């Protein structure tokens, strides 16, 4: 699960000076890979494997198709809104404020569920290190930890994030070496041993495959954060789009290799001791106890970082909606004067994470997160189609129509293949948002949301 950077950052949080354009295409790609993290498919691996009957590689590749089309749309929309950088803004200003509000509401669920599933996963991983401490205690610990650090304004620097991403990459390389040694020590295998991770006729199910793909999209969450760097990028009209697409492509290739290696070690027919931390057990089988603890510790550190950053990202999104009067402004639009953060929102998201850690499974949380993400992605694709094709922003409008239309279709297809539990829970959330909007506007007869853009939006 990648770190989701804050979007739609207001001037009071982001400064008032113009930013220097110093980020090259390479810098943007590195940033994107750091945000998503080199270990992105590992936390969700077990859930996808069980859901897709072992076809994890194929699900990752299918999800990549949806993300690549959407990445093109994000890159194009970043040209128009270089600092707002939010699906909430894109949809609201290009399609209709009410649709922007609905997109923002779906993003609010998306953003709040990321720290929630990080809390669940960290609690499970910490339990592998200290099984004598109950899950409930770990859940309280991590929910409080994420909130406390964000309330104090503690953030990791870009340099530390790059070092951590480099360390994760090194762990992945060591893991590959262990898997190669493990596979070479096996008795001679037929060709189907190496193709089974892509397609196993004995257990294949198209429905299961596409449901797994709808969950595997979690691997790519965070790629849209590149669009927030438009004001600091050299040649942003070209490089933001290229970096977003290339980041998705590189992530897809690396993730495919990671899950392919895991499937060679642990056949789909064998159950995992714990589905949520399944990849840790795969590493243990490939390299022994030391590899088990190395991967467990690596993913724990990575997920702690994701939990902290995504909680602050959620708090900032709620602040943006509160500032725009889409949510109660007095609570959600308030900023703590001492630390310059939306403290009310940090506490609110922390409470949701703690309650959710006891109320739902990691799988349901991940699927509900993707429920909101796919809605936002469809909105961005629709906004890009409207701007560049229907309004003729592009010199070749109908050539520009293919990526956003394909993105809408593929994202809609994967969204419809989410399990019914996620569809029901997500729909309840969306209906609650629509009901609040109707109440707030007296039956949608008044202005719903204003979409204020900070004065430093460039």
Image (cartoon, rainbow, N blue to C red):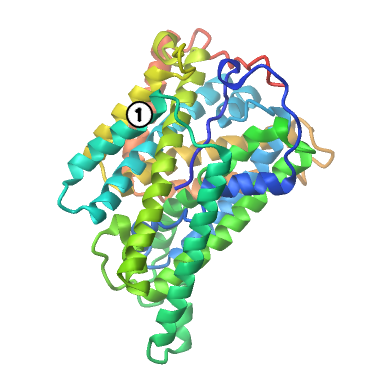
Quadrant in which residue 434 is drawn: top left
In the depicted structure, whether residue 300 falls above or below residue 103: below
Q: How many dots with numbers? A: 1
Task: Give the residue displayed 27% in from the left and 46% down from the top.
Answer: 123
Quadrant in which residue 269 is drawn: bottom left
Q: Check disc 1 and report its element: helix, strand or loop.
A: helix
Q: Position of residue 330 (x, y in %)?
A: 41, 8
Which is more toward the observer, 230 or 360? 230
Q: Position of residue 421 (x, y in %)?
A: 30, 44
Which is more toward the observer, 57 or 143? 143
Task: Give the residue displayed 19% in from the left and 40% down from the top.
Answer: 137
Which is more toward the observer, 147 or 437? 147
Q: Position of residue 74 (x, y in %)?
A: 64, 39
Task: Give the residue displayed 37% in from the left and 74% down from the top.
Answer: 286
Quadrant in which residue 203 is drawn: bottom left
Seen in the image, is 275 located left or right of residue 319? left
Q: How would you rate the neighbour count of disc 1 (Cα within 10 Å): few for under 14, some for 14-19, many for 20 or more?
A: many
In the depicted structure, whether residue 7 falls above or below residue 295: above
In the depicted structure, whether residue 158 falls above or below residue 97: below
Say whether residue 359 is visible: no
Q: Residue furthest bottom?
A: 188
Task: Give the residue displayed 40% in from the left and 24% down from the top.
Answer: 152
Q: Name the residue that disc number 1 marks.
A: 147
């Amino acid at each position: 699960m990648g770190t989701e950077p804050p979007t739609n950052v207001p001037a009071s949080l982001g400064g008032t000076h113009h930013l220097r354009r110093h980020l090259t295409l390479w810098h943007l790609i590195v940033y994107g890979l750091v945000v998503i993290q080199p270990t992105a498919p590992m936390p969700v691996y077990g859930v996808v494997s069980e859901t897709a009957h072992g076809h994890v590689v194929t699900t990752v590749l299918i999800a990549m198709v949806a993300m690549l089309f959407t990445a093109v749309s994000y890159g194009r929309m970043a040209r128009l809104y270089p600092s707002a950088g939010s699906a909430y803004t894109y949809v609201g200003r290009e399609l209709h404020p009410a649709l922007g509000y609905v997109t923002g509401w779906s993003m609010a669920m998306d953003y709040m569920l990321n720290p929630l599933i990080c809390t669940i996963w960290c609690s499970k991983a910490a339990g592998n290190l200290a099984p004598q401490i109950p899950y409930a205690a770990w859940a309280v610990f991590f929910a409080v930890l994420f909130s406390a650090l964000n309330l104090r304004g503690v953030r990791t620097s870009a340099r530390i994030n790059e070092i951590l991403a480099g360390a994760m990459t090194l762990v992945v390389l060591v893991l590959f070496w262990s898997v190669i040694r493990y596979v070479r020590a096996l008795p001679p295998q037929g060709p189907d041993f190496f193709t089974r991770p892509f397609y196993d006729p004995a257990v294949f199910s198209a429905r299961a495959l596409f449901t797994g793909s709808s969950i595997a999209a979690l691997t790519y969450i965070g790629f849209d954060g590149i669009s927030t760097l438009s004001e600091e990028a050299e040649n942003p009209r070209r490089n933001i789009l290229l970096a977003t697409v290339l980041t998705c492509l590189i992530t897809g290739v690396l993730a495919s290799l990671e899950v392919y290696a895991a499937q060679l070690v642990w056949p789909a027919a064998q159950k995992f001791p714990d589905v949520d931390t399944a990849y840790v057990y795969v590493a243990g089988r490939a390299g022994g106890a030391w590899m088990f603890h190395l991967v467990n510790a690596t993913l724990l550190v990575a997920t702690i970082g994701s939990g902290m950053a995504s909680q602050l990202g959620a708090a900032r999104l709620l602040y943006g909606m509160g500032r725009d009067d889409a949510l109660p402004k007095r609570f959600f639009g308030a900023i703590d004067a001492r630390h310059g953060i939306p403290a009310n929102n940090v506490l609110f998201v922390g409470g949701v994470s703690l309650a959710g850690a006891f109320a739902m499974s990691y799988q349901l949380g991940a699927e509900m997160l993707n429920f909101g993400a796919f809605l936002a992605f469809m909105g961005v694709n629709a906004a890009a189609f409207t701007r560049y094709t229907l309004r003729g922003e592009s010199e070749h409008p109908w050539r520009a129509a293919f990526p956003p239309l394909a993105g809408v279709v593929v994202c809609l297809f994967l969204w419809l293949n989410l399990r019914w539990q996620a569809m029901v829970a997500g729909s309840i959330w969306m209906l609650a948002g629509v009901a609040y909007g109707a109440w707030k506007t007296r039956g949608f007869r008044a202005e719903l949301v204003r979409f204020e853009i900070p004065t430093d939006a460039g």
